[in-house]
Image (tube, helix red, strand yellow):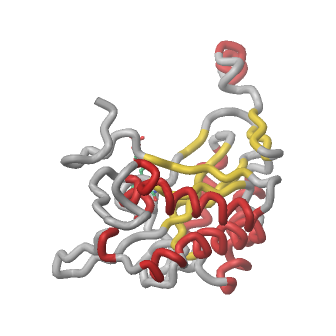
Amino acid sequence: MEQVNQLKFKRLFSPLSLRGCILPNRIMSTAAVTRLASEDGHVTEAIKERYQRLARGGLGAMVVEAAVVLPSRSSFNLRVSDDQFILELQDFVQSIHRVNPDVKIGLQLIHFLKVARSGWRQKVEDLKPEEIAVIPGQFAGGAVRARTAGFDFVELHMAHFTTLASFLSLVNKRKDEFGGDFEGRVKLPTEVVLATRRGVGEDFAVGVRILGEEFTKEGNTLL
Ligand SMILES: Cc1cc2nc3c(=O)[nH]c(=O)nc-3n(C[C@H](O)[C@H](O)[C@H](O)COP(=O)(O)O)c2cc1C
């Protein structure tokens, strides 16, 4: 059965090279938070087992769920905000490669705005210039740690409710250089990409997840 499918869908089962990262086929799983990390963001046996199971299916690439690049607390999400997480992330990657040596493993990097229990949500308009200035470095730091830990690529999360998605959104009403027109809205995300590239070097794949359709009032839309 496997062979029949491979003959029928030749391209799907052919390798793809991205900056030296060779995916054995073009089937990739997207990031999905499992909440199997510990409450303070550490790798657990349960999370290792979850991704080992996925790897056994034979996909070409997997994006491991969003790992937090900023120091703020975020329960049950993986963290890559500090060097202390490198060794356990290395063990995590190795545990997946043990069951599937060919699958390419990426770590998704996330930065989010604050949300309070009261329902209050921080908006991009609330961020002070000095708070914006540290964000590219936080992503670059997370990407370098991911590479050091042995991940094959990183994905910058610029979709859904994340900080960078909120900058890209038409709902971004900042009056300074980081908002307003297209140039303003892409400024911070572009700085993040450039800082990440400078950090990891040229020979490492860096992906970006963006929204085509925001499904929010006045947001970007495909329609
Ligand atoms: C529980 C859950 C957690 C998710 N976490 C992430 C995430 O960390 N990063 C991300 O980019 N997408 C995340 N997603 C979105 C998925 O990657 C995917 O786009 C979404 O589930 C739609 O695909 P589907 O129709 O195959 O489920 C999550 C989805 C679910 C259901």
Where does residue 4 sit, x and y in percent of width and height? 68, 15
Relative to residue 52, is residue 122 depicted above or below? below
- Using the rendered image of the protein, determine whether residue 145 is visible from the camera's viewpoint: yes
- Looking at the rendered image, the quarter that the C terminus falls into is top left
Where does residue 209 sit, x and y in percent of width and height? 51, 49
Quarter where residue 160 is shown: bottom left
- In the picture as drawn, the residue positioned furthest to the front comes out as 176
Q: Residue at x 71, y 33 (%)?
A: 25
Where does residue 55 sit, x and y in percent of width and height? 65, 49
**Observer-nearest of 139 and 63:** 139
Q: Residue at x 47, y 72 (%)?
A: 77
Q: Residue at x 42, y 63 (%)?
A: 178
- In the picture as drawn, the residue positioned furthest to the left comes out as 118
- Using the rendered image of the protein, determine whether residue 50 is visible from the camera's viewpoint: no
- How many numbered circles are shown? 0
Where does residue 217 sit, x and y in percent of width and height? 19, 48
Relative to 134, 214 lies left or right:
left
Quarter where residue 177 is shown: bottom left
Relative to residue 15, is residue 176 depicted above or below? below
Q: Residue at x 29, y 70 (%)?
A: 123
Relative to 71, 181 lies left or right:
left
Relative to residue 205, is residue 81 depicted above or below? below
**Observer-nearest of 126 and 144:** 126
- Looking at the rendered image, the quarter that the N terminus falls into is top right
Relative to 73, 86 lies left or right:
right
